[in-house]
Image (cartoon, rainbow, N blue to C red):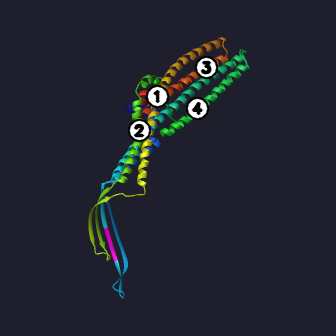
């Protein structure tokens, strides 16, 4: 019984290890998406920028807290005192001094405005981080789909090449029986060379696409295999384009959020610079201990309410205020321009999706017709009423339609995710909803 149990446990372990190894080799769209959000260097850089702006808020807030400073000094001096025209005395002195001061801002619009400005920069960095995260997630999905498209097209062309080579072998057998000419063989070989060149081009493009996917996701994809996308994933297109995408795009698009954040920064900076025209009030407390011959004031504690009134700084305050006012105008125009661009982009994507859905349906019909024509050509070739060129043309037509259908299916999904990324709503559940992995 113990041997049977041990053998069963060993078999279970081997099966589990085999399943795990297969899972490690296969890469899904969701895996690529999550890896990009975790490992992409550009996204990590943007996260560091956001954390830096958070520290900028703390720095600005620190200016509103009590500012404490302390100084201490020790030194020696030589001095000469004159008593009258004929007499004087020269002596040495060792002196010490220390003082402690506390300064608290009571009112300073510029200081308070600087905190608002730092918060506006933090909010802008947060919006840029969210937009960058949306873009990186989309690039991971797009890179995966483009690589998957090239992989599937390569498989179609490989099948076409295999079929052409089989036909060439049949043709050589027909030549030996005098049923075909050398010209027919040369024509078939030329078709094979053409298809092989196309296959090499697709395979090269696939390797380049995998390298691009590696750069986005941070994964080593040398031994990884892409999971094919579901053949019916495109069928949700009509329900997708019926949704209102303009409203969420104008509210949550990364480009719009950045433009609004830049406007908030410009307004906060303008408010801060206006504070340069206003007086400032500070509360100051200082204790001084001074041991030197130069004064008989040994110790002093002073509490003051200071009022600082700017009078003239060469026009620099006015220039900075006008400059920030113009930046507000520029940011408002930029926001309007960005919103117009988003409206156009949403309309373009929905129209492209509608056209893509129609093209897929047409290509499916064309595929059925091409396959029927190929079957008829094959029977005609066997019966001697169709030439080899006609058969190869029919086979090439099937391959072209299959490749066009594959490309359009992938392009349809890319457009779906691009629409979500434009609206700022792309999340992992969108991927699982379409691909189910």
Left or right side of 109 for 417? right
Q: Quadrant of residue 296?
A: bottom left
Gap in Å between the C-alphas at discs 4 and 1? 35 Å
SS at mark 3 in the image? helix
User: Which badge, 3 or 2, is on the more N-terminal residue?
Assistant: 2
Residue 203: mark in rendering: 4
* Position of residue 267 measured from the top left corner of the image (x, y, whole percent): 39, 45
* Residue under numbered circle 1: 347
* Position of residue 370 measured from the top left corner of the image (x, y, whole percent): 58, 17
Residue 395: mark in rendering: 3
Q: Is residue 329 magenta?
A: no
SS at mark 1 in the image? helix
Gap in Å between the C-alphas at discs 3 and 2? 51 Å
User: Which badge, 4 or 2, is on the more N-terminal residue?
Assistant: 4
* Position of residue 427 measured from the top left corner of the image (x, y, whole percent): 41, 33
Gap in Å between the C-alphas at discs 4 and 2? 40 Å
User: Which region shows up in magenta?
Assistant: 94-98
Gap in Å between the C-alphas at discs 1 and 3? 38 Å
* Disc number lying in front (3 or 2): 2
* Disc number lying in front (4 or 2): 2
* Disc number lying in front (4 or 1): 1
* Residue under numbered circle 2: 257
Check disc 3: other Cα within 10 Å, few if <14, some if 14-19, many if 20+.
many
Q: Is residue 96 magenta?
A: yes
Which residue is at 34% across, 66% downward? Answer: 71
């Amino acid at each position: 019984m113990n041997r049977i149990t041990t053998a069963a446990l060993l078999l279970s372990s081997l099966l589990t290890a085999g399943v795990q190894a297969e899972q490690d080799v296969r890469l899904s769209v969701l895996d690529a998406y999550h890896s990009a959000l975790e490992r992409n260097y550009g996204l990590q850089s943007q996260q560091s920028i956001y954390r830096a702006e958070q520290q900028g808020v703390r720095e600005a807030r620190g200016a509103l807290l009590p500012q404490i400073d302390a100084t201490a000094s020790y030194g020696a001096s030589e001095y000469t005192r004159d008593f009258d025209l004929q007499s004087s005395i020269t002596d040495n002195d060792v002196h010490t001094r220390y003082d402690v001061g506390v300064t608290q801002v009571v009112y300073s619009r510029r200081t308070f405005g600087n905190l608002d400005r730092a918060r506006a920069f933090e909010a802008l960095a947060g919006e840029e981080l969210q937009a960058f995260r949306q873009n990186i997630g989309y690039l991971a999905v797009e890179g995966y789909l483009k690589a998957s498209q090239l992989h599937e097209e390569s498989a179609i062309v490989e099948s076409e090449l295999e079929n052409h080579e089989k036909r060439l072998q049949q043709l050589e057998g027909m030549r030996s029986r005098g049923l075909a000419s050398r010209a027919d063989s040369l024509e078939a070989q030329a078709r094979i060379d053409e298809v092989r060149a196309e296959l090499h081009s697709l395979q090269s493009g696939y390797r380049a696409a995998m390298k691009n996917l590696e750069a986005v996701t941070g994964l080593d994809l040398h031994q990884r295999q892409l999971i094919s996308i579901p053949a019916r994933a495109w069928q949700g297109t009509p329900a997708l384009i019926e949704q209102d995408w303009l409203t969420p795009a104008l509210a949550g698009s990364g480009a719009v959020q950045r433009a609004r954040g830049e406007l908030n920064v410009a307004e906060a900076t303008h408010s801060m610079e206006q504070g340069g025209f206003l007086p400032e009030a500070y509360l100051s407390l200082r204790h001084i201990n001074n041991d030197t011959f130069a004064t008989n004031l040994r110790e002093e504690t002073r509490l003051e309410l200071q009022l600082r009134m700017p009078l003239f700084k060469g026009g620099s305050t006015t220039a900075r205020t006008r400059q920030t006012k113009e930046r507000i105008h520029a940011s408002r125009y930029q926001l309007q321009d960005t919103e117009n661009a988003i409206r156009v982009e949403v309309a373009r994507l929905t129209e492209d999706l509608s056209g893509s859905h129609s093209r897929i349906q047409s290509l499916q019909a064309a595929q059925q017709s091409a396959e029927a024509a190929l079957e008829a050509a094959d029977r005609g070739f066997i019966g001697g009423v169709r030439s080899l060129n006609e058969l190869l043309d029919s086979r090439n037509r099937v391959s072209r339609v299959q490749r066009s259908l594959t490309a359009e299916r992938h392009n349809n999904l890319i457009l779906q995710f691009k629409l979500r990324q434009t609206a700022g709503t792309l999340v992992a559940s969108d991927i699982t909803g379409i691909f189910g992995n």
